[in-house]
Amino acid sequence: MDTVFENFSNLEQFSLNSALDILLVTAVIYSILVLIRGTRAVQVLRGFIGLALIVAVLSSLVELPAFSWLVSKTLPTLLLAIPVIFQPELRRALEQLGRTGNYLRFFRRNKESPIVGAVKDACIRLSQRRYGALIVFERDTGLQEYVDTGILLNSESSPELLLTIFNKHTELHDGAVIIRGESLAAAACVMPLSTSSLSDRQMGLRHRAALGISEVSDAVAVVVSEETGQISIAHNGRIIRRQDPTRLDIILNAFLQNRYQGRGGQS
């Protein structure tokens, strides 16, 4: 009976602040899990949890003074190493917090971008000719550091210009075209390569570069495979393959307006 009364006493102490406290902790843990889902950080986190469980079990079962001393001296170093190990995920989280445009986008009027139509027409013809291409749409995260690695254009977009850039016999076909607003900012830009494993051997450097830029920014990248002619889209650290070229404008507009509800992931 005393235990029952103690439980009732604890329930009486449970207040609105306690509920808010629990909700905030849950939201933080959930956000971290969503952020690292599908990344290498998941395996690292499992390793940390497994190591912590082993240490806890050993400490409770057997007295190990030397081992306990080693853990007590190593733990602060491991805590300092966490920001280094999870640097890509932490950077991604801070960038997402700083993207005020994501919240303002709900109040924007959805409209189709004319440059998307030009990209669609160019990708269809590039796919038919088996010309490889990588086209990156800059969004809220600035890509100036990658623009500086290429050849500045600042020109209006057209299918003919994109076909010329990605022609195998031109100097600009290697690298990415970065689209800023309604114009082509630069061509032959060097993108960061993803270190994630790609299951399909047909996905080469262009796919890895598209995945890489989508991991470090909110950019949307379109890839045309030189080997198969297939069109893929990379966004938010995931690459979606085998896109229908005739619907590419609809899919791109959906991505750029944050309305796409597909599953995501490599396919």
Image: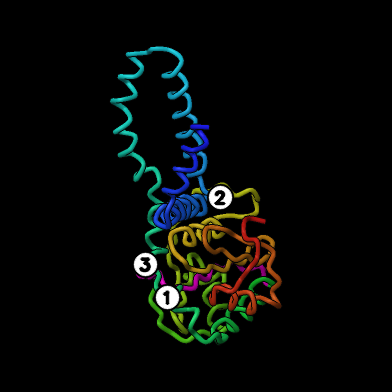
Disc 2: CA contacts within 10 A as few (<14), some (14-19) or many (>=20): some
Asked if the residue under mark 2 is in contact with the one under mark 3, i.e. CB atoms within 8 Å, the reply is no
Say if 154 sits above or below 62 in the image: below
Whether residue 247 is situated above or below residue 63 in the rendered picture: below
Residue 14 seen: yes
Quarter of image, res 222: bottom right
The amino acid marked with disc number 2 is Gly
Q: Quadrant of residue 122?
A: bottom right
The nearer-to-camera label among 3 and 2 is: 3
- Label 3 – label 1 distance at C-alpha: 9 Å
Q: Residue at x 67, y 71 (%)?
A: 127
Residue located beneath label 2 in the image? 38
Figure quadrant of residue 24: bottom left
Tell me if mark 1 has few (under 14), some (14-19) or many (20+) residues whose alpha carbon lies within 10 angstroms of its own: few
Give the labeled residue for mark 1: 101
The alpha-carbon separation of the residues under discs 2 and 1 comes to 25 Å
Classify residue 42 as left or right of residue 186: right
Considering depth in this image, is 202 or 17 the residue closer to the camera?
17
Furthest toward the front, the residue is: 1
**Which segment did they paint magenta?**
129-150
Residue 149 among those drawn in magenta: yes
Query: Quick one: SS at disc 2?
Result: loop
Earlier along the polypeptide chain: callout 3 or callout 2?
2
Q: Amino acid at mark 1?
A: Gly
Disc 3 residue type (three-letter): Gly
> For the residue labelled by badge 1, is the local secondary structure a helix, a strand or a loop?
helix
